[in-house]
């Protein structure tokens, strides 16, 4: 793969790579590091990319593997996400503003198990079809649908709990 082909096929995937890495690592800095390191490696090994039938799936699989490697190195990511979520500012109005709602959703997603968070991100944020997610995760489509269903159910439950906690906190003031 030459520079022009690399720029045409791999570089446009950068934002998708970052969003996927961020959804797994829960840290913009860590996601940026993973994407940067991976792009460097793909550039060095670009000659081997000609053999890939589906570059997007290959690249996202590489992102996932790099993220899992990073998570093994940084066991404190979940503790950091929980700590960061508990220090979020609260508004004093009765309604939740847009930024606070986004923070609640971000924290609820962060509380999901890794696999559910991953499938939810790929399906609902990136818009991948179930068949591509199944191929990416090396499982069947029924399993992907089950994980997605559980992720959405868990997200719904976490958001309801957070909203109830938010409501209770505001009334206790």
Image (cartoon, rainbow, N blue to C red):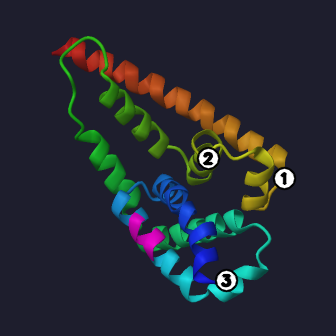
Residue identifier under label 2: 116
- Which comes sooner in the sequence, label 1 or label 3? 3
Circle number at residue 1: 3
Residue identifier under label 1: 140
Q: Give how far across and how far down residue 137 sits, in percent.
A: 72, 59
- Marks 2/3: CA distance? 35 Å
Q: Is residue 33 magenta?
A: yes
Classified by dominant secondary structure, the portion drawn in magenta counts as helix
Q: Give how far across and how far down residue 23 sits, in percent.
A: 49, 52
Residue depicted at x 53% and y 61%: 17
- Lateral position of residue 164 relative to residue 61, left or right: left
Residue reaching furthest to the left:
173
- Marks 1/3: CA distance? 31 Å
Q: Viewer-nearest of labels 2 and 3?
A: 3
Q: Give how far across and how far down residue 45 sits, in percent.
A: 61, 87
Pick the front one: 161 or 140: 140
- Lateral position of residue 148 relative to residue 96, left or right: right
Q: Residues within 10 Å of mark 2 (few under 14, many from 20)?
A: many
């Amino acid at each position: 793969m030459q520079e022009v082909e690399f720029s045409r096929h791999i570089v446009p995937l950068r934002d998708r790579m970052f969003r996927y890495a961020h959804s797994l690592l829960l840290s913009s800095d860590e996601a940026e590091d993973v994407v940067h390191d991976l792009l460097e490696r793909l550039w060095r090994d670009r000659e081997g990319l000609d053999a890939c039938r589906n570059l997007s799936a290959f690249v996202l699989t590489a992102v996932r593997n790099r993220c899992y490697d990073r998570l093994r190195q940084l066991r404190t990511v979940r503790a950091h996400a929980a700590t960061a979520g508990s220090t979020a500012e609260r508004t004093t109005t009765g309604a939740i503003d847009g930024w606070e709602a986004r923070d609640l959703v971000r924290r609820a997603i962060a509380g999901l198990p890794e696999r559910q968070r991953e499938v939810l991100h790929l399906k609902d944020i990136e818009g991948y079809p179930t068949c591509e997610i199944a191929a990416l995760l090396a499982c069947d489509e029924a399993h992907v649908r089950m994980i997605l269903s559980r992720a959405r159910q868990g997200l719904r439950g976490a958001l309801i709990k957070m909203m109830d906690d938010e409501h209770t906190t505001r009334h206790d003031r």
